Structure formats: structure tokens, C-alpha cells
Image (spheres, grey):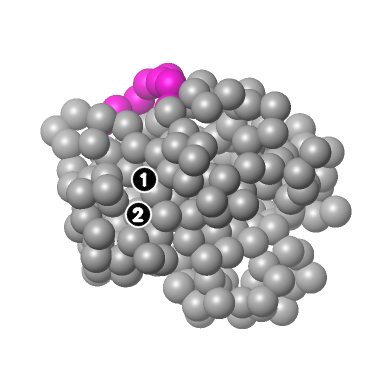
């Protein structure tokens, strides 16, 4: 089975995501962001069900920064994993406030998952073979304050993990939004594999 990858920044195309897909036993198929509408059309016309949108060195709030096509979240029979910048783009377009720290955070860390909420959402399969504290890696300046402090759109955006007041993992419609790089750690790769397999063992 083929898994789609959308690289949001042509200057930052790297092997981590394709290699993570190969780790799952599937075949990566990559496209490079050109325009929002072009990406939307390619995904709509593709037979590929699972799509990963990459991070980017762009600043998401700038007028000329690439933005993910919001319409993808209403496409039937498609699933999305939005990594870092792509998570920021999703939330930014849904009127959430982004903040920037003075110092970039590039570190490995442990992320506690709200498994009670995960079970209510019937998403336990995502964490098969994992503990409720994932070993992950993050690398970003911009972040979204934890949605637990902002209930405006929480009926749609279900935050299952935050770290030091920052939103780190959200379920939204047919997508998972993460403010870390799952493709760079073993736990993250297992999470990606579980997401693609989409079944409870």
C-alpha cells in the first residue's frame, strides 16, 4: 500500500518521513507543496488513503507562507497526519493563536497521553504497543498554547496531550495533529504504523 507525503517546504525535504513509512512496511509517495489548491486536487484525485503533511522552516503566520488545504478534513475515506508546521497551519486557519518563544526547542522528551480521552474517542489502536509516556523529539519555535486553556473549538479539536503548557497532540475530524516529529523516534514510528493499520489488536 502507498502512503502519501506532502513536503511543505521544498528546501527541507528529508528522508525521515519516507524511512518511517518504509519501517511500517508500506511505500512512500512524495509530493512537494506548490499551491494549496494544487495539493487539494492531487489528494482528491489520488487513490492513496493515508497522507502525512511535513514540518517546515516557514513562519506559518506570514501572508506568503504555504497553508494546508482545510478542505481535506472533509474528504471522505482519507486520513491525515499533520506534523509540526502542518499542525500549526491547521490551527492557525481555525483562528487559534500561535506563540513564538525566543529560543528554538530541539530536544527529546517524554509525552504523557490522556488515555481516558483516547478511549472515549475510540482511538486506542493508535497506541498499541506503547506506554502512556511516549519518547519523542520536537524541533520548533512556534507553538499553540494548550487547548485545555482555550475551550472555544474544543468540540472539534480533542487535545490528548500537552507538554509544559503547549498543545502537542490533537484529534480533529479525520486527522491527527502533532507538535513533534514522530518520524524521528521508535515510539513515533510505532504510532505512525498503528495509525496506518487502523485496527485494535
Total count of labels:
2
**Looking at the image, is mark 1 or mark 2 nearer the viewer?**
2
> Is residue 67 within the magenta segment?
no
Q: Is residue 4 shown above or below 102?
A: below
Count neighbours of disc 2 (C-alpha within 10 A) and say few if under 14, some if 14 to 19, many if 20 or more.
many
Q: Is residue 119 shown above or below 108?
A: below
Q: What's the magenta bit mostly, secondary-structure-wise? A: strand
Quarter where residue 179 is shown: top left
Q: Are marks 1 and 2 in contact (CB under 8 Å)?
A: no
Q: Residue at x 52, y 66 (%)?
A: 173
Is residue 195 found left or right of 58 in the rendered image? right
Q: Please provide the residue range marked out in magenta.
A: 104-111
Q: Residue at x 33, y 43 (%)?
A: 167
Is residue 82 found left or right of 150 in the rendered image? right
Q: Is residue 167 shown above or below 152?
A: above
Quarter where residue 61 is shown: bottom left
Q: At numbered mark 1, what does the secondary structure look like: helix, strand or loop?
A: loop
Quarter where residue 40 is shown: bottom right
Q: Residue at x 69, y 58 (%)?
A: 50
- Give the image location of residue 193, x and y in percent: 72, 39
Is residue 15 found left or right of 160 in the rendered image? right
Q: Residue at x 58, y 64 (%)?
A: 174
Q: Earlier in the sequence, mark 1 or mark 2?
A: 1
**In this figure, which residue is indicated by the disc labeled 1?**
57
Disc number placed over residue 88 in the picture, else none = 2
Q: At numbered mark 2, what does the secondary structure look like: helix, strand or loop?
A: helix
Amino acid at each position: 500500500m502507498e502512503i502519501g507525503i506532502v513536503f511543505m517546504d521544498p528546501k527541507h525535504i528529508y528522508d525521515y518521513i519516507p524511512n518511517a513509512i518504509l519501517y511500517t512496511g508500506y511505500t512512500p509517495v512524495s509530493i512537494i507543496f506548490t499551491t494549496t489548491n494544487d495539493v487539494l486536487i492531487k489528494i482528491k484525485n489520488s487513490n492513496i488513503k493515508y497522507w502525512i503533511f511535513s514540518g517546515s522552516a516557514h513562519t506559518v503566520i506570514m501572508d506568503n507562507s504555504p497553508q494546508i488545504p482545510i478542505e481535506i478534513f472533509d474528504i471522505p475515506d482519507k486520513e491525515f497526519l499533520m506534523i509540526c508546521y502542518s499542525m500549526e497551519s491547521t490551527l492557525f486557519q481555525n483562528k487559534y493563536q500561535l506563540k513564538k518563544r525566543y529560543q528554538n526547542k530541539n530536544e527529546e522528551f517524554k509525552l504523557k497521553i490522556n488515555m481516558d480521552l483516547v478511549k472515549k474517542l475510540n482511538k486506542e489502536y493508535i497506541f498499541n504497543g506503547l506506554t502512556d509516556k511516549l519518547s519523542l523529539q520536537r524541533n520548533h519555535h512556534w507553538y499553540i498554547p494548550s487547548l485545555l486553556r482555550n475551550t472555544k473549538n474544543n468540540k472539534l479539536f480533542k487535545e490528548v496531550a500537552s507538554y509544559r503548557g503547549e498543545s502537542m497532540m490533537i484529534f480533529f475530524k479525520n486527522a491527527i495533529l502533532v507538535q513533534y516529529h514522530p518520524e524521528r523516534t521508535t515510539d513515533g514510528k510505532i504510532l505512525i504504523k498503528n495509525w496506518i493499520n487502523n485496527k485494535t489488536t
